[in-house]
Amino acid sequence: MGTVWRAADELLGRQVAVKELHVDAGTQAMGALREARVVAQIRHPHVVVVHDVVEHEGIPFIVMELVDGGSLADRLAGAGPLTPREAARIGLALLGALGAAHERGVLHRDVKPANVLMEAGTGRAVLTDFGIARLAGATTISETGAFVGSPEYTAPERMQGAEAGPAADLWSLGALLCAAVTGESPFRRDSIGGILHAVVFDEIRPPARLGPLVPVVRGLLERDPEQRLGAAEAGRMLAACAAGEDGAEPVPVALYTPTERVTRPGGPLPAASGRRRTALRVGLVAALIVATAAGTVTATTLLGDAGVRGKGSGGTAGAAGPSVSVSVSVSASPSPSVSVSPSPSPSPSVVAVGSVRPAPAGYQVVTDVQGFSLAVPVGFRRTTDEQRVFYGSPDGAVRIGIKMTAPPAGGPLGVMRLADQQGSETNPGYRENKVVATTHDGLPAALWEFTWDGFTRAEGARHTFDVCWEQNGLLYDVWVSAPVGRSAEARGHFDAALDSFVPGGAGSARP
């Protein structure tokens, strides 16, 4: 978008930064003036100051405060990643800068390490390059049909073409915090198509290296902007991390995820609940079409632990049915209670009141809003995506997954055999795989077990145990995925989940 020069303000006798805009005269020059006015409205110690706008030979130049120092991207490339405590300090500064911008209706839309300047000597972090910032109701100066922003740091709602608000900048901040501690964005891939797929579909699991930043990053990287961690809570959590020790315990989950919005997928439901989340699904399909056009992403029907590709999950195929929106209050007590209230949508709510089976020592029985109950280890946290429910360990390494869909042709064994055939395509390093016929509560079932290379080299290979069966007109799929070194632990969780599982049809209230 431009070249930034170090220059001297001869009138006031000061060093400044001058940004030469790479634009044509006319409409784009007017856009440059708008950019300067946008930034000039924001008064905050962590937002770059705009002094003036001048024009030379038809080219606009923006005269700005000179921040003597490189960018955060330069710092990471030269000296390596930051500690969680250092990253938290920078995150707090940027959160304040974004808050000042959002109060004036300004979205930055390109929060990334390259746009954060680090002042030499003071360590002050300054957010710059509001070149694609946007006032509510105004177009951006760089909106010429090209993608606006940096895909690795762009929120999924923007990828899907939906209206983006301040929450989109908070997503970008979450990706930046992850990059600051690990050295790269969590969505770094080899191609633009791969990046789009990662942002919209892939499992998001902040690495353990983030330490006490894991909860805040996980909250900021919530795909549903309505459930994304808000600025106030993020600020409190970052302040606690910045003031504490690098190895401090993470902030309790209940402090930043008081509610979750979930959907009930699969299976025939009464006609009253026939509304579908069409807009979001269309957005996801559009993003996938873009990725496929780039020649890098292939859609499959296998939906498992890591998104559309089913990576490391042992998920099963099947079309999603109608959904019902509900709100869930999650308690921080050892035995969380679940209360249900209607969402803003007109869809009816559902609450499970079925019978439960006792939990082994160290486990607690969770009655899920999707109608089923099962035993999960104490301390496991509930998350969801469009079609699945997960209960994950505090470090995110061990995951219990549950999915319900309309029964596909071929029954459980056919579903698992198809997933096994696609295993090498959906799970890099797919090996030690088997599919066998079995039973669950006397019903025909299939067991799929396999090992694959895993999500990251640092974590290493993972192993998955997965069983599916048909019951009450639905195909139930329950699996556990964990690092190979924790396979025995995962098998114990798998057995406990299956032994205690009570499907939603057993006494649950239906709308």
Image (cartoon, helix red, strand yellow):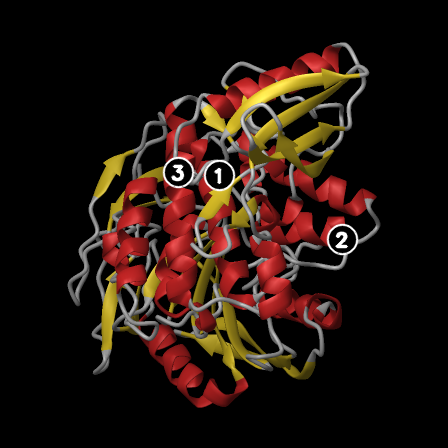
10 Å crowding of disc 1: few (<14), some (14-19), many (20+) = many
Q: Position of residue 471 (x, y in %)?
A: 44, 60
Q: Position of residue 42 (x, y in %)?
A: 43, 26
Q: Identify the residue position indicated by label 2 in the image.
A: 297
Inspect the image, locate mark 3, and give the three-letter code of the amino acid beneath it: Pro
Mark 2 or 1: in front is 1
What secondary structure is marked by label 1? Answer: helix
Q: Position of residue 44 (x, y in %)?
A: 39, 33
Q: Identify the residue position indicated by label 1 in the image.
A: 169
Question: Quarter-wise, where is residue 5 in the image?
Answer: top right
Mark 3 or 1: in front is 3
Q: Identify the residue position indicated by label 3 in the image.
A: 45
What secondary structure is marked by label 3? Answer: loop
* Left or right: where 25 falls relative to 384: right
Split into 4 quadrants, where in the image is the N terminus?
top right
Question: Quarter-wise, where is residue 509 in the image?
Answer: top left
Inspect the image, locate mark 1, and give the three-letter code of the amino acid beneath it: Asp
In this view, 102 is above or below 56: below
* Left or right: where 378 falls relative to 58: left
In this view, 297 is above or below 322: below
Whole-Å distance between the Cαs marked 3 and 2?
42 Å
What secondary structure is marked by label 2? Answer: loop
Whole-Å distance between the Cαs marked 2 and 1?
26 Å
First in residue order: circle 2 vs circle 1: 1
First in residue order: circle 3 vs circle 1: 3
10 Å crowding of disc 3: few (<14), some (14-19), many (20+) = some
Split into 4 quadrants, where in the image is the C terminus?
top left
